[in-house]
Image: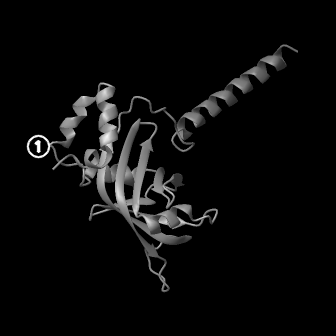
């Protein structure tokens, strides 16, 4: 059994490019002595639950990829104990391109990035859509039209080399508060100095 993501991603044309460009060593991931990369560990589960956004790719019936960003408060994307990922599908611009694509082809790819830590997790899976029940249920997120269940088939941690370091306003909040306080103190000193020199 090959390493799960390599089995999906390393097609003959990909292998050809790897060989042509000096990356032939990746062939070892396709051998029978390599396996894994298909069952989420605690590391992946924690990373998923901490995220506040991810990119998802689906493919249309015309063969075109469609990439969309999904965001929310940490915890809106959840990993459950059945090697699945679940998120609430909230109403957006009502084009339903991802949803339409997934009804024709349930394959999905996710890229989850933690910019401050320069970590990136790629996930391949298959989707089952759960429409909003007619009777209210306690764990149904407010505003959700449906839930998307992604059964994980493969994942891979990506190289951090080219991930830019970015912080959200919340992550940068402590630093900003210190800078604002320092700025106020400097302005106060400047005003006092200007008042004395008049």
Task: Please tell me how crowded label 1 is: few (under 14), some (14-19), or many (20+) other residues with Cα within 10 Å.
Answer: few
Rendered image coloring scheme:
one colour
Q: In the picture shown, does residue 69 fall above or below 135?
A: above
Task: Farthest residue to the left: give it.
Answer: 33
Q: In the picture shown, does residue 35 fall above or below 78?
A: above
The residue under the point 27% across, 44% down is: 6
Number of numbered discs on residues: 1
Residue 47: x %, y % from top left: 36, 48
The residue under the point 43% across, 66% down is: 148
Looking at the image, which is closer to me, 183 or 38?
38
Looking at the image, which is closer to me, 15 or 52?
15
Q: Quarter holding the C terminus?
A: top right
The residue under the point 82% across, 18% down is: 194
Residue 32: x %, y % from top left: 12, 45
Residue 172: x %, y % from top left: 54, 38
Say which residue label 1 marks.
33
Left or right of 148? Residue 124 is left
Looking at the image, which is closer to me, 32 or 55?
32
Q: In the picture shown, does residue 85 fall above or below 48?
A: below
Q: In the picture shown, does residue 116 fall above or below 56?
A: above
Residue 99: x %, y % from top left: 51, 66
- Secondary element at tag 1: loop
Looking at the image, which is closer to me, 141 or 7?
7
Task: Farthest residue to the right: give it.
Answer: 198
Q: Quadrant of residue 20?
A: top left
Q: Quadrant of residue 179?
A: top right
The residue under the point 24% across, 53% down is: 38
Task: Farthest residue to the bottom: give it.
Answer: 135
Left or right of 108? Residue 157 is left
């Amino acid at each position: 059994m090959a390493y799960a993501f390599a089995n999906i991603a390393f097609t003959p044309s990909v292998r050809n490019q790897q060989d042509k460009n000096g990356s032939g060593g990746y062939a070892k991931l396709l051998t029978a002595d390599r396996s894994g990369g298909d069952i989420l560990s605690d590391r992946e589960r924690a990373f998923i639950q901490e995220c506040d956004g991810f990119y998802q790719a689906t493919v249309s019936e015309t063969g075109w990829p469609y990439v969309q960003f999904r965001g929310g408060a940490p915890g809106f994307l959840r990993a459950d104990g059945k090697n699945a990922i679940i998120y609430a599908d909230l109403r957006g611009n009502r084009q339903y391109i991802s949803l339409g694509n997934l009804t024709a082809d349930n394959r999905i790819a996710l890229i989850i990035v933690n910019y401050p830590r320069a970590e990136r997790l790629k996930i391949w899976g298959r989707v089952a859509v759960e429409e909003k029940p007619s009777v209210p249920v306690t764990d149904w997120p407010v505003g959700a039209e449906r839930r998307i269940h992604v059964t994980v088939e493969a994942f891979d941690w990506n190289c951090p080399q080219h991930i830019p370091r970015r912080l959200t306003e919340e992550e940068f909040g402590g630093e900003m508060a210190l800078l604002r306080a320092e700025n106020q103190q400097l302005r106060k000193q400047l005003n006092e100095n200007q008042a004395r020199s008049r």
